[in-house]
Image (cartoon, helix red, strand yellow):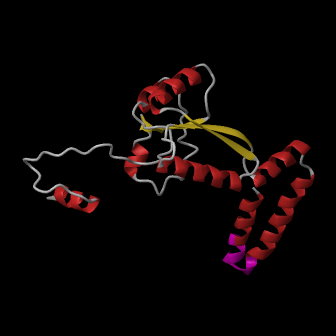
Amino acid sequence: MFIVLLIGAFALVSCGSDTEEAVEEEAVATEAPAEDMTDEEMEDETHEEMGPSGTVSLWHAYGTGSAEESAVTEIVANAQAEFPDMQIDVLQIPFDQIFNKWQTEVAAGEGPDMFIAPNDDLGNMARAGLVMDVTAQLDGRLDGVTDTGVAGMMVEDALYGVPESAKAVALYYNKSMVDAVPTTTEELMTAVEA
């Protein structure tokens, strides 16, 4: 919160010299309540500055040694380096079991905090209350994600996950309609446009 006030103060200073006194008064006013803070409030503020803490559990179904598993391992290592007070427990679940295991354990009040899996059954999981509406938490944080990626994580105008990747499992073509099989995405797009 102090950082937000500090940024606001810099913005006022940049507006002109008449605001300098107002900024100094605001800075003094914001410092005074800190002395009256309870121990609990001071602890909360310290945790905010330090970052998240505690334990988060994550399941995935990526194959051992796959590029996807390597990427998740790297992301988790980066997160733990950035937030040393947070522990991330990662568990690999076989792909053919991850959905049933998630549904069974979450319905019983158990299971991980998060899991990575295709959005094949997202609608049913959202309607069953097995995944959380995270629309508010992700507001303004998915600007670099394609509209298709965001839409793939939505059910009835609510966002139930973070788009992680996009894959084409298989692409079939009609030999009587396609002269040459595209070998790159660019060639595919050219064929589609034609």
Give how far across and how far down residue 53 sits, in percent.
75, 44
Q: Residue furthest bottom?
A: 17
Q: Is residue 69 above or below residue 121?
A: below
Asked whether, in this view, residue 113 is left or right of residue 53, the answer is: left
Total marks placed: 0
Q: Based on the displayed image, in which of its 4 quarters is residue 183 positioned?
A: bottom left
Asked whether, in this view, residue 36 is left or right of residue 24, the answer is: right
Asked whether, in this view, residue 61 is left or right of residue 39, the answer is: left
Give how far across and how far down residue 164 sits, in percent.
48, 47
Q: Quadrant of the C terminus?
A: bottom left
Q: Quadrant of the N terminus?
A: bottom right
Q: Is residue 6 above or below residue 172?
A: below
Give how far across and how far down residue 153 sits, in percent.
44, 40
* Magenta highlight: main SS: helix
Give the magenta part as a residue range.
11-18
Residue at 53% in and 27% down: 102
Give how far across and how far down residue 190 sits, in percent.
19, 61
**Nearer-the-camera pick, 117 or 13:** 117
Residue at 83% in and 67% down: 25
Residue at 72% in and 75% down: 13
Q: Residue furthest left?
A: 176
Residue 187 included in the magenta stretch of the image: no
Asked whether, in this view, residue 71 is left or right of residue 145, the answer is: right
* Residue 129 in view (yes/no): no
* Residue 135 in view (yes/no): yes
Residue at 76% in and 48% down: 85
**Nearer-the-camera pick, 36 or 26:** 36
Q: Based on the displayed image, in which of its 4 quarters is residue 29 positioned?
A: bottom right
